[in-house]
Image (cartoon, coloured by chain):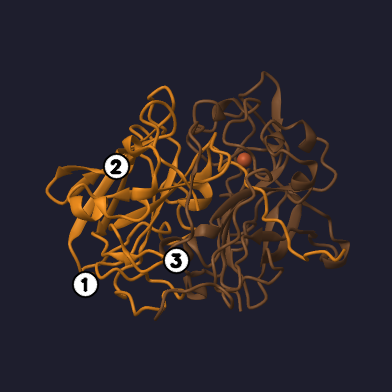
Chain colours: A brown, B orange
Amino acid sequence: MSDGAYFQRDRQWHPPAYAPGYKTSVKRSPQAALISLNNTISEMTGPVFGHNMLGELDNDLVHNYAKPGESAIGQRIIVYGRVLDENGRGVPGALVEFWQANAGGRYRHKKETYLAPLDPNFGGCGRAITDDEGGYRFRTIQPGAYPWPNGVNDWRPAHIHFSVFGHAFAQRLITQMYFEGDPMIWQCPIVNTIPSREAVESLIAPLDMNNTIPMDARAYKFDIVLRGRRSTMFENRMEGN
Amino acid sequence: MQGLDQLKETASQTAGPYVHIGCVPNFCDITGVFPEDLGCRMVNEHTKGERITVRGRVFDGTGTPLRDALIEVWQADAEGLYPSPQEKRGMADPNFTGFGRSPGDMATGEYVFETVRPGTVPFIDGRPMAPHITFWVVARGINIGLHTRMYFPDDEEALKADPILMRIEHQVRVATLVAEKTGEAEYTFNIHLQGPKETIFFDI
Ligand SMILES: [Fe+2]
C-alpha cells in the first residue's frame, strides 16, 4: 500500500524556472532556491471532482460549442490515454482539463491577435474524469500551429494544453501534448525549456491507427504520469499516529 | 541489474497566455460549455466559520502585475479538516470545497477568493502548523507551477511556533508568506515572483 509521501519532484527533468530562450520566463522566474518541504497533510490532500459534474459534451470539442446540427472545422481526432502515477498504477477519478487553438491556430480569447479566423463552432475547451483504470478520452479537431511573439519568427507546434488534478495538491500539473512527426516541435522555444530529449518525447502523442474510427476520426494516445507515493509500511511514526 | 520499473513524471510546460480557455472559460466569455467555472465558489450560505476575503496580485521581477496568471488555493475548513478522501481524521464541512481558482482581473491582475479562515492542521510529527492557505500559481512564462503558502498576520504565537517557518534559514523572508490585514475580514496577499521581495516558494 502506497500511502506515504509523494516522490520528490525531479527538478532536472522539468524545465527550469529561468529559461532565457523563452523570454517571458526571464522576469517571471524565482531566483532564490525553492524551500524543500516534506509533504504535510496540506499537500497530500487535494480536491476531488465527481463524474456527476460533467456534461454530456464536455469531452467533445467538435460539438460542445457548436450550433445544433453543426460541428467544428478541422481534422477530427480522438485523444485518449491513461493518467498513471510513477509506480505505474492508474489514477482513477483524476480531473483532466484541456484547451487548444482551432484548426487555423487561432484561440478564442480577447487577447489573441493572430490573423487566422475564428471558427464560430469551436470554443476550444473540454474536460474528462478518469475511469477506474485511469483512462480518459475526448474528441476534438487537430489544432493548427501558430506564430507568437518571442523571436521574430517563432511558431508553436500544434499542441493541446492539459491541466491534471490527481489525488493530492502535490500532484498538480499543467503540461502540453504534441503530435507525432511534427518538425516544429524541435524548433519551439517553449518545448526547448525542457532539458532532455527524453522528457520532450514523453509529451509527443503517437498516432494510433488501431483506435482510429474508420471514415471518421484518427486517434492519438497520450498518457500522463503524476507523482507516485512511497509505501509507509516501514516508516517511523510518532507514537499513536 | 534489475530496473526500478518506475515512470518519470510527465514534464511540465507553461500554462501559456490562454490558460483561461481551459480552466475558467466563462471568465473569458466562452459560455454555454460548462455551467460555471471550476473553483469559483468555495463557500455557500451554510458554510461554518469566519468568512474572509483574500485578494492580491502577482508581480514579476520589474514590479509589474501579471494580468494573465491563474491562482489556485487549497485549504482546510474552519475546524482544520480537508474536504478530501485522503483526509482520515474526520469529515470536513460538506458546505466547503476547500478549493478555489481565480484568474487575475484582465485589467488590474487582482485575484479574489471568498472563503473561511482555515483551522489548525498538524505537521507530520503532530505539532500544530499555523493556519495557512496553500497557493499554486501558473501563468505564461512560468514553466512549472509555483507552490507557496499564505499565513495570517494575527496568528503571531502560532507563526513563531510553526514547524516549517521556524526551519527557514533566511528568517527575513518569512514575512513574504504572511498576508496583510487590509480590512474587516479581508487579507491581501501579494506574490512576488522575483526581486528583493521575492516570495518563498516551496518544493513540496
Ligand atoms: Fe497554446
**Residue A198 x %, y %:** 79, 46
To which chain does the residue with label 3 belong?
A
Quadrant assignment for the N terminus of chain A: bottom right
The local crowd at label 3, few if under 14, some if 14 to 19, many if 20 or more residues have their Cα within 10 Å, is many
Kindly tell me whether mark 3's CB lies below 8 Å from ligand 1.
no
| Front in this rendered view, residue A169 or A206 | A169
Which residue position is annotated with label 3? A47
- As drawn, the residue found furthest toward the top would be A152
Query: Residue A156: image x %, image y %?
Result: 69, 34
Q: The numbered mark 1 sits on a residue in which chain?
A: B
Q: Residue A131 or B131: which is nearer the viewer?
A: B131
Q: Chain of mark 2?
A: B
Give the image quarter of residue B118. bottom left
Q: Nearer the viewer, residue A140 or A36?
A: A36
Same chain check for tags 1 and 2: yes
Tell me if residue B127 can be seen.
yes
For the residues labelled 3 and 2, the Cα–Cα distance comes to: 22 Å
Taking the spot 52% from the left edge, 68% from the top edge, the residue there is A167
Q: Indicate which label's residue lies in the foreground, 1 or 3.
A: 3
Q: Amino acid at mark 3?
A: Pro
Please say if B190 is above or below A6: above
Q: Which residue is mark 1?
A: B46
Residue under numbered circle 2: B189
Residue type indicated by callout 2: Phe
From the top left corner, tell me how far across and down residue A108 is, in percent. 54, 42
Residue type, label 1: His
